[in-house]
Amino acid sequence: MMEHYERILPGSADRIVTMAEKQSAHRQDIESRVITSNIGNERLGQIFAFILGLIGLIGSIVLASLGRISIGLIMFLAILVSLVAVFIVGRYAQSRERETKLDKLRDALKSAAVEPEHPTLPK
């Protein structure tokens, strides 16, 4: 196919390959930035969760030391349960996202195996 382009317009095969290389480099750069951003966002979320959990723990200890033991205990348990729930929900969401991406990849591979893009290419 590239020979056909080259016969029609000399130098076009090299231009097509260069364009594909530039697009690939661009895509990899974007993916790298997205991954770096996601890692930073997760780290920031963990830091905020730690700070909020620490504030809640200190608040429940202060309440318990002021004689409000039941309120302090309830507050401590509520914070503990909410942090654990957020962790579990986050892991579940990640698992579902991976499954969805895997299903899409399987579908794409099945459709590519059944219908080749070019009629001269082997199945």
Image (cartoon, rainbow, N blue to C red):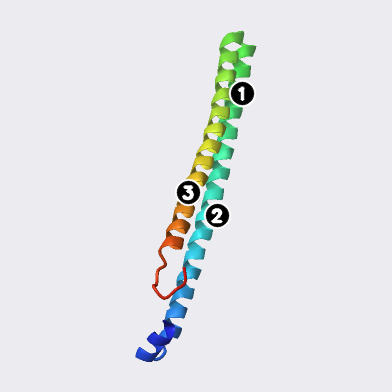
Task: Choose mark 1 or mark 3, whichever is in front.
Answer: 3
Mark 1 or mark 3, earlier in chain: 1
- Where residue 46 appears, as percent x and y from the top left, is 58, 39
Q: Quadrant of the N terminus?
A: bottom left
Measured in 3D between alpha carbons, the distance from the residue under mark 2 to the one under mark 1, in whole angstroms, is: 31 Å
Find residue 57 and name its label: 1
Q: Which residue is mark 2?
A: 36
> Residue type at mark 1?
Leu
In the picture of the structure, the residue carrying the numbered disc 3 is: 103
x%, y% of residue 119?
39, 73
Q: Amino acid at mark 2?
A: Thr
Label 1 near label 2: C-beta < 8 Å? no
User: Circle 1 — which element?
Assistant: helix
Q: Residue at x 56, y 33 (%)?
A: 87
| Residue at disc 3, secondary structure | helix
| Vertical relation: 87 (above or below) 116 | above
Circle on res. 74:
none
Structural distance between the alpha carbons of marks 1 and 3: 42 Å
35 or 100, nearer to the observer: 100
Q: Nearer the viewer, mark 2 or mark 1?
A: 2
Few, some or many residues within 10 Å of mark 3 (<14, 14–19, 20+):
few
Residue sitting at x 48%, y 53%: 106
Mark 3 vs mark 2, CA separation in Å:
25 Å
* Residue 113, horizontal then vertical, whole percent: 46, 62
- Callout 2 secondary element: helix
Q: Residue at image x 42%, y 80%?
A: 16
Report whether 123 appears left or right of 83.
Answer: left
Q: Against 22, is 65 above or below?
A: above
Which circle, 3 or 2, is nearer the viewer? 3
What is the crowding at mark 1: few (fewer than 14 residues within 10 Å), some, or many (at least 20)?
Answer: some
